[in-house]
Amino acid sequence: MKTTILKLSLFFLFLSPIAGAQEMLTMPGESPLIDIRIQFEVGAIDDPKGKEGLTYLTALALSEAGTENRSYQDLLSAFYPWAVTVDTTVGKEMVTFAATVHQDHLDEFTKILTEMLGSPGFDPKDLERLKDKGKNYLTQDLRQNNDEELGKEALYLQIYPNSHPYGHHNFGTVSGLESITDQDIRSHYRSYFQPKRLIVGVAGGYSEGYPERLAQTLAAELASESELPARPTIAQPPSPDGRRVTIVEKDTRSVAMSLGFPIDVNRSHPDWAALFLFRSFFGEHRSSNSHLYQRLREARGLNYGDYAYIEYFPNGMYLTKPEPNYPRTRQIFQIWIRPVQPETALFALRATLYELEKVVKNGMTQEQFDATRSFLKKNAPLLVASSSRDLGYALDSKFYDSDPLVKRLRADLEKLTLEELNEAIRKHIQADDIEIVLVAKDAESLRKELMAQKPSPMEYNSPKPEEILREDKLIESFPMELGEIRIVPVSTLFR
Amino acid sequence: MSFPRFLHLVFSLLLAASIAGADTLLPPGARSRVLDNGMKVVVIPTDTKDVVALQLVMAVGSRNEVEEGKSGFAHFFEHLMFRGTKRYPPDAAQEMLKEAGVASNAWTWDDQTVYHKVFLKEDLDRILDYEADRFMNLEYEEPEFRTEALAVLGEYNKNSANPTEKMHEVLQDTAYDTHTYEHTTMGFLEDIEKYPDGYEYSWTFFNRFYRPEYATLLLVGDVNPEQAFGSVERYFGEWERGDYVAELPVEPKQTGPRKADIEWESPSLPWVMVGYKAPPYSDLDDTATIQLWESLAFSKTGELYQQLVLEEQVVDEFEPFFWLKKDPFLVGLAVRVTDPAKVDEVRQRVIQTFEKAKDQTITVSRLDDVKSRVRYSFLHSLDSPDSIASNLAFMLSLNSNLESIDDYYQAIGNVSTDQLTRVAGKYFRPEGRTVVTLKSKEEKDI
């Protein structure tokens, strides 16, 4: 196998326990830029019932608000000439603060960062602003401005019922955010942002002893309460019963689609690399080099793109690679069909189910397996092509107790056989029990069309090869065998 | 893809070296050459083992769409460039790129279309061979052409739920009367819907613009310049020069403020977008000054952001825009207003920030802050060959001479506080202003 080194320097990874803080991960290198990722073992699953969004608000109260001694404006002014931002990732199970800072400013930045995380100001005015930010994200950006992200998040809500720890958006719900008081935020901070839940990651050309000093200072600043709150058990959600459709009704030109079901594979599972390869073949993110894209977009011009996932991947329309630090104990298999014209929606849905059913039944061929494996061997290192991403992925590997991503993928893909791959597909992927979310304007007529189960022939604006027309005949009357079809007005989501 | 999101880095790249006091910002070892057919080649070796980033920059974009009914065609054509050739039919091309693990895509904007790839150096020759073949010998039949037209409509559809996409469309349409900047890179919807009938025209477009004199090839990473020049010459040397130059309509000078209102079908908080005609890239001093002014005035440390977003909390989205363009484009700010009753007031305050800039003194320390910021932003951007290549490709699409980049950063380094107020006064006047306001058709439950 060929080896590929994409970084300017080789990083070495050390994991070590430190006094006070739970763990530290360091990747010394030559770069004058220092990447810092501070994690806390807290996430949306720790939001109390009725206070959904509390973890999100508490995290932003640390990174996008003032401290006891400095206003948020002061922080922005300090960071401006250094071109530094503290980015916050709120996931289901972890919160991560990430920054990249030049060594010229490392000491001063560290002082401020310690203040931000250790002595937050909780100024009511800042908290009000952050609450509005969360609510506007849910009611404006998600419900109204981005049908694709809406469809994906709505899919998760169909798979994880409200009672499940994953049963609300990472940013919470509108009513949850509204009901959170300043006192709730203070108390959540004290309970969850404790040294015992802290993980410090540092990469780059830092001076000797820097990560230890950072971790110890942070641990000393954070309040240590004796009781660590218990975290909820994250059970596997029930498998959907049949093919269940949710039509999210809103004013829109086209129909966005997301389909999926829970899988019991995450990065610590032995079949993860096999499914990683399968989803690359079936629907590599933003690539024309995958099966669904070729069949739906290239051959038929149904839309702009068609992809498949085995891990949570928010904001995919803006990113060519997934961002790290959204680790999850539970994952779903997901298909993302980019918006189609309403008149071809039925055909597109049938084509998707047809292709999924086919690949589950027949598996992948040796040729498809070899080509995808070759692609991933060379392409996977691009996931960690900057040291900040590398550090983020290393923290995720720690969460999953797995080898570093590229090393692990290479080793597993090298060993993988076609038989094992197809066995993994048969075991984890299926087309019978699946949640389907359609974001559409005229929901009632779409529901009637879906229920009628009539053929949905495609009409093209140009002649098509015989092979496509033959397949279209199969697809146009493909028995969708849909179960329940519900209509959900968009205004009721994330409420 | 029709719209790049990373171009703020370019600016950082430019200023960085000027602050550092270097004669040139270009990485050591950067070399350029012009082939006999007029194609430019730039090679920048880095010590990044094995990896090569390739960017093929075509100096054609939606600005060149001078014919009625053809808006958005440059972007559509970008899609067609993936339709294959005799030697590399689509399936064979996919197979080769997949085997080589190539990350590949393209984007189109007003002044340029850029095709980019990242791969391992062992694959350099076969990638160059593939690229040269498709740029010289592209081939597709009408049925595939018509299918691809639908994918572009799909791209329009996926963007259409976002109010700011619509606002940029209306802003440009309102601010321009004759120049092709009156439409966005996606083009007018009524034109996109007619693409399937434009097969013959697509070859006219190809034969006009996909010529070596419009092309700059950039290679960054683990490459040896001399060997790379040899390979590029071998594969692209036969590409035949053309002679077409689009006759662009000259935009008459705007003589008064303009405005447009959008009634948005979906529930939405109101948005206000305010834009002013800005200098073209060729006017280096004014462009550099406007760019610095915009970075200062609309940063999170600027007065307007602090008041509207942090203090009064009447705005929650705050999106300044200014891009380097070949002809006078727009500099502006888009904001989402959280209190619909405050729309008129917020709009007025945005306008005042622009139009009172001529009376306001900017301190030397603020100017130093912005220069420091862009220096460190630049350093942050040097994390991969792809990132370096992306930054340079954009600059080379505006002026293909490598030296022109240094000229621009010199202009930026020379900006003084006096210049900031003087140039702001020259451009931010009522007669150069266009305002777009978007309000929901009816106040629904959102």
Image (spheres, coloured by chain):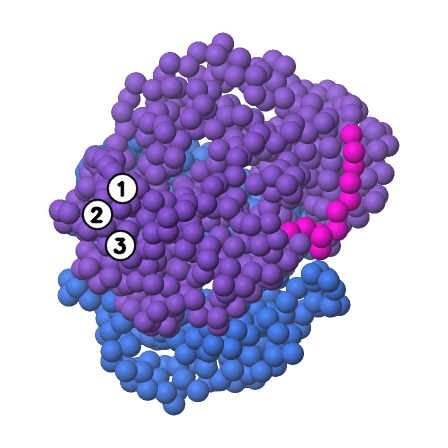
Chain colours: A purple, B blue
Q: Mark 3 points at which residue?
A: A220
Amino acid under disc 1 = Met
**Circles 3 and 2 on the same subunit:** yes
Residue placed most toward the observer, A277 or B103: A277
Disc 2: CA contacts within 10 A as few (<14), some (14-19) or many (>=20) = many
Q: Mark 1 points at which residue?
A: A24
In this rendering, the label closer to the viewer, 3 or 1: 3
Q: How far apart are marks 3 and 1 (CA)?
A: 15 Å
Q: Is residue B438 visible?
A: yes
Furthest toward the left, the residue is A208
Q: Residue at x 45, y 35 (%)?
A: B134
**Circles 2 and 1 on the same subunit:** yes
* Range drawn in magenta: A483-494
Q: Is the C terminus of chain B in the top left, top right, bottom left or bottom right quadrant?
A: bottom right
Is A80 positioned to the left or the right of A367 in the image? left
Q: Mark 3 lies on which chain?
A: A
Residue placed most toward the observer, A316 or A264: A264
Which badge, 3 or 2, comes first in the chain's sequence? 2
Marker disc for residue A211:
2
Residue placed most toward the observer, B247 or A441: A441
Q: How far apart are marks 3 and 2 (CA)?
A: 14 Å
| SS type, badge 3 | helix
Disc 3: CA contacts within 10 A as few (<14), some (14-19) or many (>=20) = some
Amino acid under disc 2 = Pro
The answer to whether residue B169 is above or below residue A412 is below
For the residues bearing labels 2 and 1, Cβ distance under 8 angstroms: yes
Q: How far apart are marks 2 and 1 (CA)?
A: 8 Å
